[in-house]
Image: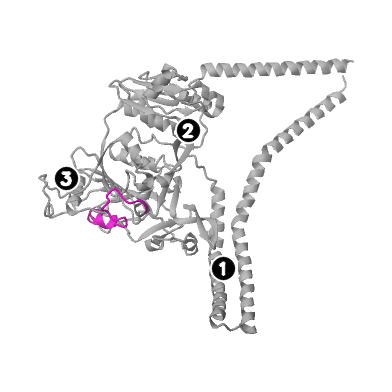
Amino acid sequence: MLAKLNALDRNRLGMVGIALAIVLFLAVNILSGALLTSARLDLTADRLFTLSEGSERILSEVEEPVDLRFYYTSQLDDLGPYFSSYAQRVEELLQEYQLLSQGKVKIERLDPQPFSPEEDLAVAEGLEGLPLRADGTQAYFGLSGRNSTDDIEVISYLAPERANFLEYDLTRLVHDLASPEKPVVAVLGDLPLMGSQFNQFQPWHVLQAMYQFFDVRFLGGKQDMIDEDVEVLMLAQPHNVDEATLYALDQFVMRGGRVLAFVDPLAEVMAAGGGMNPMANPEGDAIGALEPLLAAWGVAIEKDQVIGDRTAAQRVSAQIGGRQVVVDYLPWLGLDASHLDDDDVVTGDIQRVNLNSAGAIHGREGATTAIEPLVATSELSMPIAVEEIRTMPDPAKLIAAFAPSGESFTLAARITGPVKSAFPDGPPEGVTSEAEHLSEAAAPLNLILVADADLLADAAWVREQDLLGQQIAIPIASNGDFAINALDNLSGSEGLISLRGRGLIDRPFTVVQAMQQDAEYKYRAKEQELLARLEETEAKIRALKEEEQQSAVILTAAQQAEIESFRAEMLTLRRELRDVQRSLRENVEGLSTWIKALNIWAVPVLIALLAAGLAWFQRHRARRAAATPA
């Protein structure tokens, strides 16, 4: 009887304990929600939920009021947490902006219901409606801002897919409203930044980003002098540069002007989509056109070779042996943080840059400038002749011929130091500028040189995705951030350096990729050998068949036996080829199976073992208690 009462008391005590635990849990959540609204603990790898120093600096320097209107139609909550949880994150971040700006940034939340004044205001300010129902009902999820001089900036749709770039978008909007004066960037070159017939003349996303931060001017034709108010000159693969324009560029640098140059030995986007200048040769030589300036600046780019890197090669779909396979393409590089200089403000926050057929930057003998690599390959890289990939490149053959040089190649660099004019004897004949000729630079050279121009093209770093009838641009690399960082740094702006996306949608499985590459390079050469032997055998069979058809003479028994021998060899080669191609996938598929098993079963098994251990411990303790004399 006493044992039953003790058991009953323990049961009641357990129930009371559970009830108290629930009350305590609710109390802690309510108190933390009320008292710890500004507390943050960010454990993400890229610190996605922590404001950068650039954002904090910009918000602390806001002097004039900035009014933000956050539009969110509450009916989007009915679609689930996809919108509602992201809207909560946006609102919490905006509240932090208001706090850090000492109240200079003011937030107003509006719920634009159908046919309401708030909906009319959202439409008037340029927000894009999201279709909710077939009857035409629309919802809104965006942000508008206005400063004291009635300048307006709008984020027409706060796409959840751009969650990793939320801080970038919000701080950019506040910065543009708080600092309406933008640095002047002049662009000279033949890249189709404004678009071409292949994309319905839509400006590239990098150019749209430049418009957000800078006063962009395009230079065309003969230039006798670069305007005094230009702070940064951007050279975008210029194929046609006359001597007068070269002199204008030279004197711009001599006056202390800063330069961001994209000079590519093989600009694939030019050959595919033409350039800004319809008279420019898509296969033109930008390196040769700028050679006098490059020589004066103490740098060189080999114009007949690009660089392939085994550790960074992008995966592409290619036709190999009559089959469509996914294979590494050595000249297309996806370079992660290990290839970037994390001590430089331009690349410090960059996670990935995609380059297509980039060249290598070298110093010249006797140069007075210093080269500081910003983007470099690993030592598992090698030069590849441009002619091998200019037309119909074969990724498998490049892999089979791959022989690492053991050298790291510089693909983008900061060039600094004293320089002299490329025109030591004064202005060339025909130059009409009345400005005084400078034979030496008034300030040390400040140049960022990139041996690739294709990285600016949308195809290299942006993917378009359709969502609820809207085309959303999703970055898969930080190419745009790299270009804007470089222009920001060269223009002297420091507050925006860290204002970049610090997370990417693409989070590759690096271990799986490494295994894929090991298998690729182990078996691809053997595959090429078997394909060559197979093609040779098939050619012999075709030759004997053609001989029979042309001579109208039946083949002899020996010739028939030879054909059968060739066919047997062909079957053997095909079997070996299948074995090799299967070997390309075996290890990766095995690892994938283990990863799936761990993800699916590891946690349940661990919980089951823990529960079983606790149950055993409880039974063991109960037995000991029962065995102990009262």
Q: As shown in the figure, which amino acid type bears the numbered disc 1?
A: Leu
Q: CA distance from mark 3 to mark 2?
A: 44 Å
User: Going 34% across and 41% down the picture, which residue do you hit?
Assistant: 203
- Mark 3, secondary structure of its residue: loop
Residue for badge 2: 163
Q: Nearer the viewer, residue 142 or 266?
A: 142
Q: Which mark is residue 140?
A: none
Q: Which mark is residue 530?
A: 1
The span picked out in magenta is: 272-296
The spot of residue 323 in percent (x, y) is: 55, 59
Residue 444 in view here: yes
Q: Is 131 displayed left or right of 231 in the figure?
A: right
Q: As shown in the figure, which amino acid type bears the numbered disc 3?
A: Met
Residue 98 in view here: no
Of the numbered discs 3 and 2, the one sitting upstream in the chain is: 2
Give above or below for 63 relative to 532.
Answer: above
Q: Is 617 displayed left or right of 231 in the figure?
A: right
Q: Residue furthest right?
A: 1
Q: As shown in the figure, which amino acid type bears the numbered disc 2?
A: Ala
User: Going 73% across and 15% down the picture, which residue do you hit?
Assistant: 16
Give above or below for 610 relative to 433.
Answer: above
Label pair 3/2, CB-CB below 8 angstroms = no
The spot of residue 454 in percent (x, y) is: 37, 50
| Crowd class of label 2 (few under 14; some 14 to 19; many from 20; radius 10 Å) | many
Residue for badge 3: 225
- Mark 1, secondary structure of its residue: helix
